[in-house]
Image (cartoon, rainbow, N blue to C red):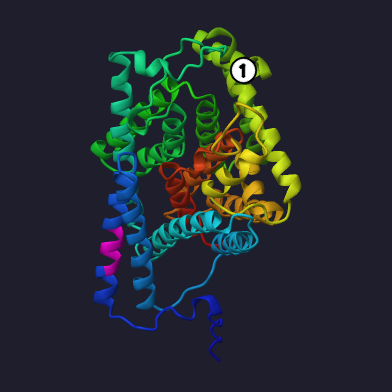
Amino acid sequence: MPEASAPTPWLLRWQGLLGGSSAQQHRLSTLAGLVLILLLGFLPVLTRAGLGLIVLACGALWVLWSLTRAPGRIGPISGWVLLFLAVAVLATGVSPVPVAAAKGLVKLISYLGVYALMRQLLAEAPQWWDRLVAALLGGSLLSSVLALRQLYGPTEELARWADPNSVAEGTIRIYGPLGNPNLLAGYLVPILPIAMVAMLRWHGWGSKLYAAAALVLGTASTLFSYSRGGWLGMLAALGVLMLLLVLRKIRHWPLLWRRLLPLALLVLAGVAIAFAATQVEPIRTRVASLLAGRGDSSNNFRINVWLAAIDMIQDRPWLGIGPGNAAFNSIYPLYQQPKFNALSAYSLPLEILVETGIPGLLACVGLAIASLRRGVRALSTDSDLALPCLGCLAAIAGLMMQGAADTIFFRPEVQISGWFCLATLSLMTRTP
């Protein structure tokens, strides 16, 4: 007796209403791939107007494509994303600045359209993953070359990013086409592990050299950005990827070696980091600024903003002030300390709590756990998406590390890479 098919979730019952032939599906998938290549390839150099148009095109294309194909199922990652969206809608409804919060909600929905299109394209045609990554690496190569060229140009403009009241006074920081060293590092951090996976995954010396160039130049650009959060994010991303690759490689080894080898690698990595932090002058200077507490002007600024953000959370702990920077900019002046104006909470967890309250943070924690579980499955499977999922999990680790003391993630140049990683992880099915 044939097994009854699972009922279609009511959220997806609008999908497939128009119907569509296989030829139409193929044309739509090709169009989706080309639009996403345009988005990822030119991400660091697009104007805000151009970026907005392409993001809107992605959402519209996903709706059109969904109307012509049968509905699928909502996986765990997409489920948590939808839950966060529901919380954001509620937060907008009860926001003290509903108009400003509505602008943030529209931005969130537009980014979710990009995520949905990426997920649908990769589900229908997984071979597009490599093409999208090639475009993403092309954008990172362009950014890295433009940034590294600044090392050989006039330094007056670069020096403005070194606070004269900071321990790191006089440090020359590159920023490339993104205009901000921290943003440059935040853009490159999630791309570095993906570039390493591409180098391992792709065939042919030309493709491997292309990925290797993106990895080497991206690493150098992140180092010369002198972004402390970027350095920590890069260490987390590449370190997690190396650990995952080792665990995958030795998964059939005896249990004792499976436990001892990763532990030995972690000890060696710790020793290497400690040596660099104490013996390499530029790194020692940035570490000293990190440990200086309020003695460093950048740290002092962040601490004051964090304290103001905590006051905002205490006043509205359940649904926050509503999503988006417009809502934050409307409410923050009521809490800020004199001379410490800010555009964000400078901490990803605090920003989520400020905007969507405790339910929003819980939804994000659930999303992180679901992503981790999907990524861990890749350790024990020979699926074609196993290595991409490990790279994306490492990229998310890097984003979370940098996001602990910054909110670079909310910039589209960074956020879109994060949604690409989640779309990839959402396709890792349960192993047999």
- Indicate whether residue 338 is drawn in magenta: no
Q: Is residue 144 visible?
A: yes
Residue 369 picture location, percent across and down: 64, 52
Specify the quadrant of the image occupied by residue 193. Answer: top left
Q: Which residue is farthest right?
A: 314
Q: Quadrant of the C terminus?
A: bottom right
Identify the residue at image location x=29%, y=45%: 41
Of 387 and 25, nearer the camera is 25
Residue type at mark 1: give it: Val
User: Closest to the observer: 339 or 226?
Assistant: 339
**Badge 1: how crowded within 10 Å, few (<14), some, or many (20+)?**
few
Residue tagged 1: 271
**What residue occupies the far bottom of the structure in this picture?**
1
Q: Label 1: state its secondary structure.
A: helix
Q: Residue at x 45, y 31 (%)?
A: 185
Range drawn in magenta: 28-33
